[in-house]
Image (cartoon, grey):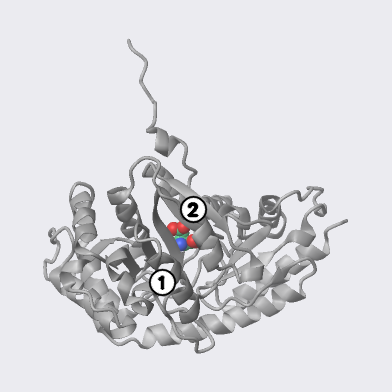
Amino acid sequence: MQAINATLNRFLAEAKPSATYRVMDRVAARRAEGKSIVSLSAGEPDFDTPAPIREAGVTAIRCGQTRYTQVAGLRALREAVADKFRRENGIDYDWRQTLVCTGGKQVIFNALAATLNEGDEVIVPAPYWVSYPEMVQVCGGRPVIVECGVQSGFKLTPAQFDQAIGPRTRWVILNSPSNPTGAVYSRAELQALAGVLLAHPHVMVLSDDIYEHLIFDGQPFFTMAQVEPRLRERVLTMNGVSKAYAMTGWRIGFGAGPEWLIDAMEKLQGQQTSGASTISQYAALAALTGTQDFVRESRTVFQRRRDLLVERLNRTRGLRCEVPQGAFYAFASCEALIGKTTAGGRPLASDEDVVNALLDEAGVAAVHGSAFGLGPYIRIAYALDDAMLTRACDAIERFCDSLSP
Ligand code: GLU
């Protein structure tokens, strides 16, 4: 008998598994063992999906809306998506230039898989969301990581951007507000990057706007296709309902861009998932067309939690944290903890050691910054109520206080 050939696709074999999911899996495993863990790891709102949206899903089931939709999504939802971009972002997309996918992740993956040939480059500013470079890698491309440290507010500067562009560059991925830093690009900052793009007509922009509504201190939100209409034919604007309406499990993301790209993404999706869940699409339609009160209310709650968390982190010995402008993550430097030893006798040589020790010795789960391309940092998701957040902060503080030099 011939042995089974377990050879994997080489692009997949070289990709890393999702670091965020690995931490979430570890939390689930610890909890299954009966341990009490406060999780600051999962990047998802802790609220329930608003009742009218849930009802829309139930109604869809009751009314028998349980068959396939068109691959690119229900026409009514695509029209609602085009309307959202017009209403909230001032970008005029025809509904045919939109595509509904199974979560924001599939929008990004489809775009990369549809366009990358082996060796094509994608500029990914770091810190980045863990999946961008791995998706590029899986699609045969080469992620070009550009480190954007605290001195530039964790944002890509026009000079860095210009330098990173080469003849093989296909895309740059922008994410504002950012996962993991909460950094937000202003209109002027996007315009400056647009200036670079205008000089390099072969580069496309993937604008991941999934945290659009979680932006604080009354700051306005801007996206590339809006600030520089001359780039419109080169931008894929991506968003979804997961973060804005607490709908992570419904798995609905959407994108809008040039028709040739949307058509290619649709072709790929038609050979892959056939499209997003019909029931979820009806719920997403209710989210986009219904009252937007929840969006405003959750923004207020997250801003209060941000203030509580950042104040506590900056009072904790060995941690230092900028005030994030959006999303629901704090990205705290743990540089001063490196080289110390925990009360349990574990040496802390990296941010990964710090998060592992925090989990095992303090019962708090966070994600190491190096998974997002910049260490030594820890990413703390504050999608928890005030009491749990305070409990987590107390545990982190005790952990840091108990370290020996
Ligand atoms: N985007 C979230 C996070 O960063 C969800 C997990 C994931 O898909 O990576 O935690």
Judge from the rendering whether residue 30 lies leftward or rightward of residue 264; answer left or right.
Answer: right
Give the distance between the C-alpha atoms of the residues marked 2 and 1, in whole angstroms: 17 Å
Residue 50, image x, y percentages? 35, 79
Give the quarter of the image for residue 55.
bottom left
Q: SS of the residue at dot 2?
A: helix
Earlier in the chain: of badge 2 and badge 1, it is 2
Amino acid identity at mark 1: Lys
Residue drawn at point x = 78 percent, y = 55 percent: 338
Pointers 2 and 1 in contact (C-beta within 8 Å): no
- Estimate how packed mark 2 is, as few (under 14), some (14 to 19) or many (20 or more) residues with alpha carbons within 10 Å: some
The residue tagged 1 is 243
Q: Quadrant of the C terminus?
A: bottom right
Residue drawn at point x = 55 percent, y = 73 percent: 183
Q: Residue furthest top?
A: 1
Residue drawn at point x = 39 percent, y = 46 percent: 120
Pick the front one: 385 or 170: 170
Residue 44, image x, y percentages? 46, 67
Q: Which mark is residue 176?
A: none
Residue 258, image x, y percentages? 23, 64
Dot 2 beta carbon under 8 Å from ligand 1: yes
Give the quarter of the image for residue 368.
bottom right
Residue drawn at point x = 33 percent, y = 86 percent: 292
The residue tagged 2 is 21
| 234 to 340, vertically: above or below | below
Q: SS of the residue at dot 1?
A: loop
| 376 to 179, vertically: above or below | above
| 5 to 380, vertically: above or below | above
